[in-house]
Image: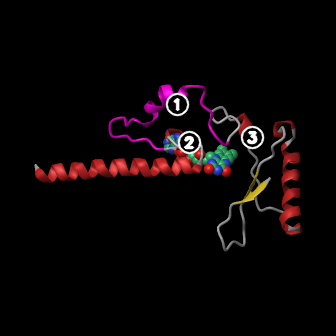
Amino acid sequence: MPAGCSPPPATTGTTRASLPVSPGRRTSDTRRDLVVRQLVDLYGPQASTPIDYLDHRWGAEPFAPGGPHPVAGPHTTVSYGRALTEPHGRIHWAGTETAGEWAGTMNGAVLTGWRTAENVAALLSRDVREGASR
Ligand SMILES: Cc1cc2nc3c(=O)[nH]c(=O)nc-3n(C[C@H](O)[C@H](O)[C@H](O)COP(=O)(O)OP(=O)(O)OC[C@H]3O[C@@H](n4cnc5c(N)ncnc54)[C@H](O)[C@@H]3O)c2cc1C
């Protein structure tokens, strides 16, 4: 299923496509043919010659098996979730895996970015205030 990802106004577009049925059993050439055929169905013959084509088997990824969402085992978040979010000295963590809501999605990534930026900004403000009062 192709999905367009191009900001308007675009004369050149980016599209991603997911093949749901055993993509690993097909050759990369066959996968490319299937994707390009769908693009041609959707956008017409000019879509038959993409400028570039990238093929990646997310199911073969060791750390994000299957994509798009990382899957933690049962009780992992409850048992170890805090360890992902606690700052380590001056290092503060963001990223979708640290999200309390929408973990594994872009939304979770953005929410944790805001959360972490706010925490760091608050600490920096405190440092400035305390430095000024010393
Ligand atoms: C195939 C697929 C489809 C997806 N589809 C959707 C979707 O439709 N909707 C949705 O909401 N979410 C989707 N997601 C999930 C979404 O993409 C992720 O949740 C999101 O990108 C996570 O953002 P992040 O900032 O937490 O991490 P990332 O985007 O993974 O960013 C981490 C960054 O850190 C960098 N990095 C790693 N190690 C180091 C290092 N040692 N030093 C420096 N840099 C390093 C990496 O290169 C990377 O750029 C999909 C994911 C995949 C894989």
Circle 2 residues within 10 Å: few <14, some 14–19, many ≥20: some
Numbered range of the magenta stretch? 68-94
> Is residue 13 found inside the magenta-colored segment of the image?
no
**Spot occupied by residue 81 in the image (x, y as percentages of width and height):** 48, 31
* Quadrant of the image occupied by residue 27: top right
Residue 77, labelled with which disc? 1
Which residue matches tag 2?
103
Q: Is residue 119 left or right of residue 27?
A: left
- Numbered disc 3: secondary structure: loop
Marks 1 and 2, how far apart at CA: 10 Å
The residue lying toward the viewer, choosing from 10 and 98, is 98
**Spot occupied by residue 104 in the image (x, y as percentages of width and height):** 59, 42
Q: Residue at x 81, y 46 (%)?
A: 19
Query: Mark 3 near mark 1, Cβ–Cβ under 8 Å?
Result: no
Circle 3 residues within 10 Å: few <14, some 14–19, many ≥20: some
Amino acid on which disc 1 is placed? Thr
**Upstream in sequence: badge 3 or badge 1:** 3
Query: Mark 1 near mark 2, Cβ–Cβ under 8 Å?
Result: yes
Q: Residue at x 44, y 52 (%)?
A: 114
Q: Residue at x 87, y 68 (%)?
A: 44
Q: Nearer the viewer, mark 3 or mark 2?
A: 2
Amino acid on which disc 2 is placed? Ala
Q: Main secondary structure of the magenta part?
A: loop
Which residue matches tag 3?
57
Label 1 beta carbon within 8 A of ligand 1: no
